[in-house]
Image (cartoon, rainbow, N blue to C red):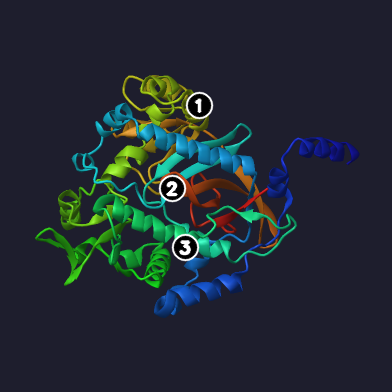
Amino acid sequence: MQNRSVTQSSYFSQETEAERLNQLCVCVTLDRPAILGNLANLLGDKADEILSSTAWQQFFSNAAVFVPDQDLDQMQAIVQALEAAAALPDYRRRVLSWGPGNAQLNPGPAGALMGYDFHLGEDGPRLIEVNTNAGGAFLNAILARAQLQCCGGSKRVAWAEDFDAAVIAQFESEWRAQRGSGRPERIAIVDDQPTEQHLYPEFRLAQQLLENNGIDTLILSPSDLRYESGVLYNGDKRIDLVYNRLVDFGLEASEHTDLRSAWLGGGAVITPNPYTHALLADKRNLAVLSDRAILMEWGLSAKNAGLLHRGIPRSVQVTTDNAKELWQQRRRWFFKPVAGHGSKGVYRGSKLTKSTFARILESDYIAQAFVPPSERQVLVDGEREMLKVDVRLYTYRGALLLAAARLYRGQTTNFRTPGGGFAPILLK
């Protein structure tokens, strides 16, 4: 036992305080009665319907995740470097060349509530994905307000000084980017069958926040919309701005005809929109964003190109030309569909079969160098368990709105892991 203790002591002396707490602290930091009360107040007449289900409880882990301040700084620097790259004319020409036809229009909005997903490792944060319809920000804001102290002491939650005000300012900024002045009178939060969506409670939270700040807000399906004479309507109500939560990123589906017409005709401000997705979140973009030489050739500073080279795992498009090499080295790679979402159709190379790889070759995929996630110890039914961690930064125009973690078991993030779910980031 003495040798084991010495070994542990030596090991922990080389770790950061945040890493030690993630490995050892099993405090329950979530005040569930407080979050229940906050949700009941904010959800209003829908509270009983939503909170009577146990599903909402799976959104939230009892534990917080500790992150060093310098890691958060590094993640923000990577985000800002990526958005600097996205402003380069040559970059835009390259990534729009493989974007859908509906993505060629740029009316000005930058994209509300962008999401940047990271794995944290010994060599620092690694950006594994960019999302334009990143879910969870409003739920995480509620979560951050219901935290208890733990053995880690009093630490800062990683979010904007005033999250609510920053969100309202963001939607007003999106409006002005296309309309020039003023603010939207009515916003529609749009998703397919929104009341059936797993994150429907978040739509209600967003609706309440917007209405509390004087903006009439509806939660609608695309079938509730009508485009007529250059205006988008729900019944007789004009829709000024659409907070778009659809995973039809190019608005190409036939059931989204009216919304697509409003986008192409400028009848409503739509955020995020097909242009933003093509510019920032198409997974094929990662292949050029991780290529330092081409970014510098296009005019990105050496500093920013270096940040992206180190901060984005090497990514390549899967083709018949590199298929043999990728198959032979498959354990080094993670395979993702170009148009995928919600971890659907993703494969860890080490678990890939030949038949699945054959299907990948027939589809549009990228291969991304595998970066293992960090871990967080939690208590589940009184037993200690290690769960995987990823970190999401919610941003607007490169500025941080909120940072949060997701705890999970398995190949990809999910909300089915006991003890898992969203977790606040506490900075150390």
Spatial CA distance of label 2 from label 1 is 23 Å
Residue, x 43% and y 35% (percent of image)? 82
Relative to residue 392, is residue 252 drawn left or right? left
Spatial CA distance of label 3 from label 2 is 17 Å
Residue toward you, 329 or 17 = 17
Indicate whether 397 appears above or below 383.
above
Please indicate, yes or no, whether residue 413 appears anywhere in the rendered image: no
Relative to residue 112, is residue 262 drawn left or right? left
Name the disc covering residue 115, or none: 2
Q: Position of residue 112 (x, y in %)?
A: 37, 52
Density class for disc 2 (Cα within 10 Å; few <14, some 14-19, many ≥20) is: many
Label 1 is placed on what type of residue?
Lys
Q: Position of residue 34 (x, y in %)?
A: 59, 72
First-in-chain label (3 vs 1) = 3
Indicate whether 33 appears above or below 413.
below
Q: Position of residue 93 (x, y in %)?
A: 27, 29
Residue toward you, 269 or 62 = 269
Residue, x 69% and y 46% (percent of image)? 18
Residue, x 35% and y 49% (percent of image)? 111
Label 2 is placed on what type of residue?
Gly
Q: Which residue is mark 1?
A: 303
User: Which image quarter holds the N terminus?
Assistant: top right
